[in-house]
Image (tube, coloured by chain):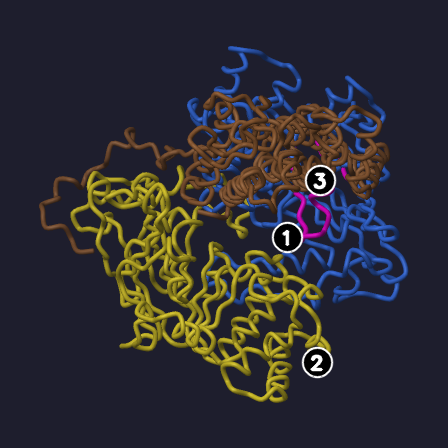
Amino acid sequence: MSQPQINIDHLFRPADKESLHSDKIARPYESYGKEVIRKVVKNKMAVFGFVLLVVIILLSIFGPHMVSHTPSKQNLTQGNLPLSSEHWFGTDDLGRDVWARTWAGARISLVIGFAAAIIDLIIGVFVGGVSGYMAGRGKTGDRIDNLLMRIVEVLFGIPYLLVVILLMVMMKPGITTMIIALSITGWVGMARIVRGQILQLKQQEFVLAAEKLGTSHAKIIIRHLLPNMMGIIIVNLTFTIPSAIFAESFLSFLGLGVQAPTASWGTMANDSLGVILSGQWWRLFFPGLMISLTMFAFNAFGDGLQDALDPKSK
Amino acid sequence: MSEYVLEVQEVKKHFKMGARKTVKSVDGISFAIRKGETLGLVGESGSGKSTLGRTIVGLYETTSGNVLFNGENTSNLNGKEKKELSRQMQMIFQDPTASLNPRMKVGDIIAEGIDAYKLLRGKERKERVIELLEKVGLHADHAKRFPHEFSGGQRQRIGIARALAVNPSFIVADEPISALDVSIQAQVINLLEDLQKEQELTYLFIAHDLAMVKHISDRIGVMYMGKLVELTTSETLFQDPLHPYTHALLSAIPVTEPKLRGTRERIMLSGDPPSPLNPPTGCPFRTRCPNAIEKCGEEMPKWKEIKEEHWVACHLF
Amino acid sequence: MSHLLEVDDLKVSFHVSSGEIQALRGVSFHVNSGETLAVVGESGCGKSVTAQAIMGMIPSPQGRVKEGRILFKGQDLTKFNKKQFRSVRGSEIGMVFQDPMTSLNPTMKVGSQIDEVLVKNQKLSKKEAKQKTIELLKLVGISDASSRYSQYPHEFSGGMRQRVVIAIALACNPELIIADEPTTALDVTIQAQILELLKKLQKERNTSIMLITHDLGVVAEVADRVAIMYAGVVVESGRVEEIFENPKHPYTWGLLNSVPKLESSEKERLIPIEGSPPDLFAPPKGCPFAERCPFTMEVCLEHMPGKEVFSENHQARCWLNDPRAPKNEELIAAGRE
């Protein structure tokens, strides 16, 4: 760097140091949430998945009201009609509007998906959290951890179909039974992830510091451990919701889930199995398409979120 | 009441590794710290110095032995008394990044102990946080920021403020400067020294930088493989070390000026420290000791006071 | 005189979402053959980025060399493509990093990892390579080399691993070794061993070493010349005696003062450098050290000081050395102690 050409002779005198403040923070601050959103927005697939999800959710709310037919109104004279301006997705053998039924079915699928995932989340985080936190904390702690992990392992080993069939026999088939059946075994995955995370996090010095300062166990879990694993929990949710939706459709398809006449993507697909060869493709196509799109949307969004939460990505 | 703030008596901390193996991280250590004193603890990685620090403040349960604080046995206490005692012993951690919760604001981090002990509320709590921030050389408006916005030295100051918030009388500083840059280390050391004077604090200062330990400590203990091998005043340790391991450790310190190059006689230790899973019989240092005798393999030398204020565990003395 | 390595006005920036971080802002220094240059500075001063630039390992696409030249034996490395870098890295420039585990493959036998380098770069047969590997392991002080040959990295201690990394770096007789904090992760007794090893190898093989470190003790032990970096520029460079005995930059004074003197028996208060280094996201337009300097003048805040040359090797960038600066010798003497 060459000497500046302008005359600087007069500047050779002590500077006013009061105006200097070298402990200031120069870099603009970006909160963790904003950073994650910025990274997700940069990922086109994730944005597409998110938009698709919003559209599906909006249609499940408003879709049935956009046509004059209600989902369960039968009109035998109008059975098996193809796509038209009157019936956008055609009608089924009982003359019910497939558009209306598809979005009514979406409600069931989404409700079951979200409800099962949230119950998984609550039980999984609680059990995983307690188990991971108590592990290595004296004899009692290890005993609690062992007990909880044995329960998880046993539940993990039971095929969920068996549980579902058993429950369907014992209880009235329907949405509630379905949610219970899916959650009974569903939470173990979340519990395992949470436990693993907690085992890692609680070695961190900030957790030791909190413990030394007398912070209670519950507060350590709620203020220190959970906020630092929110990302992983949310990513896991974006993958458990679609698998619950798929399980619902699959069970309904088998006749083990939601019962007719309630519309669900699974029951609609089941109903249309017999007529698929006679050319009424729309009866199977639309519920099938919706299942695929929903799964895709969740997975694309979840993947993007996972990448965005990875601190190594820029 | 005894002249010692802290007395450590034959403390052991063993960790189970799998079903059969045990690592004796801390294996029968005894020493005492006087009020207002700084005791330095040096040793290489894996010597058990951090485990000892954590055991003393109660983060780990002792396997055996006693820790006495102001003459009271910490393991005999329960409930309220224990919590009160625990408040007086605080800790400063090594890694200024890992020791602050990245999801909490600095103000809440500092007030964590205040909240846990329900010391202050509302406006008083806020004022106390600002007072603490200023005490460690930060600014009041830093309370609203998150840890990752600060440099390493600033974060370590936040960690110090957090420990001070509950008015402790004894602080274990576990390698508080080893993650910091040279020019920042001196800032933190000076801060610790000022706080000690101001608040009559007693320190256990754990580090591997011998020059810094010498600077801050009144007395220094040297650890090797879970055992204390020598303990004496800083001057004596550097001028008249006894244990062969201390000799080797001191001779390995780099010179401070190039013209002194080659003036320091190096005692090169052969090989590496033995595996903690399979320690040698007798004295743990005998496998690398240049002066080992037959007796060293047979029994562990006793921990004894050779001269006044000069403790050593070696068969040669 | 031509140097083995010459870095000239090197500028490197990293582009992140919120803007540009100017990691190197015109770095110049050189390494002569057979000597050890220590590059000293605090974290974030750009010393590791400099090493990455020389080795062609700046993470892209965020980071890029904006300006300047890196001449290695007369060739400009900034013009090299990936393939050319690979051949230079393997055979002419060896590397040693802070954490030996990052440069060793945990699933491969230690011996095979050295063999691989020899077979690839020196076209040795497998048998010859094995023989040479065992020689190298002996050279870096690994006892029982032939049985150690077939062990995995996890069976080695930290110090032993660093010896293996040095053996790999030496495998092709490089003319330059870049060692980035090679002893920082090691204990002091092991550090002494590794430094001795580096000194011995350099004497025997006349290799040049560019040693990146933050530890002035390590510098005092092994360096021939020193370059002090601060906020992406070299603020002072010179022979090691010149830097320790007659430093010309207040930052160098500060660094030397903030380390406790082992030799003195009195307990003196340490003299820290107040404040923190500037954020290179928005570097100051004047001297980067002005904010922390005890002798700041108005000119320091406005203009970057030029190079002031004191001897063949010794130069510094500080306005205090300008003839126009007031002669506050007393103050400066106090700062320098």
Residue at 82% x, 57% y: name it: B283
Badge 2 crowding class, 10 Å Cα cut-off, few under 14, some 14 to 19, many 20 or more, is some
Name the residue tied to disc 3: A189
> Relative to A99, is C258 above or below?
below
**Residue C34 horizontal side relative to residue A98, left or right:** left
Of tags 1 and 2, the one toward the viewer is 2
- Label 1, label 2: how far apart the Cα atoms are: 42 Å
- Where is residue C16? Give x, y as percent: 37, 46
Nearest the camera: A129 or A213?
A: A129
Q: Chain A appears what colour?
A: brown
Instruction: Note the chain letter of the yellow one.
Output: C
Q: What quarter of the picture does the N terminus of chain B occupy?
A: top right
Of tags 3 and 2, the one toward the viewer is 3
Residue at 77% x, 59% y: name it: B275
Q: Residue B65 has which mark?
A: none
Q: Residue C146 has which mark?
A: 2
Residue type, label 2: Ser
Name the residue tied to disc 1: B239
Q: Is residue B53 magenta?
A: yes
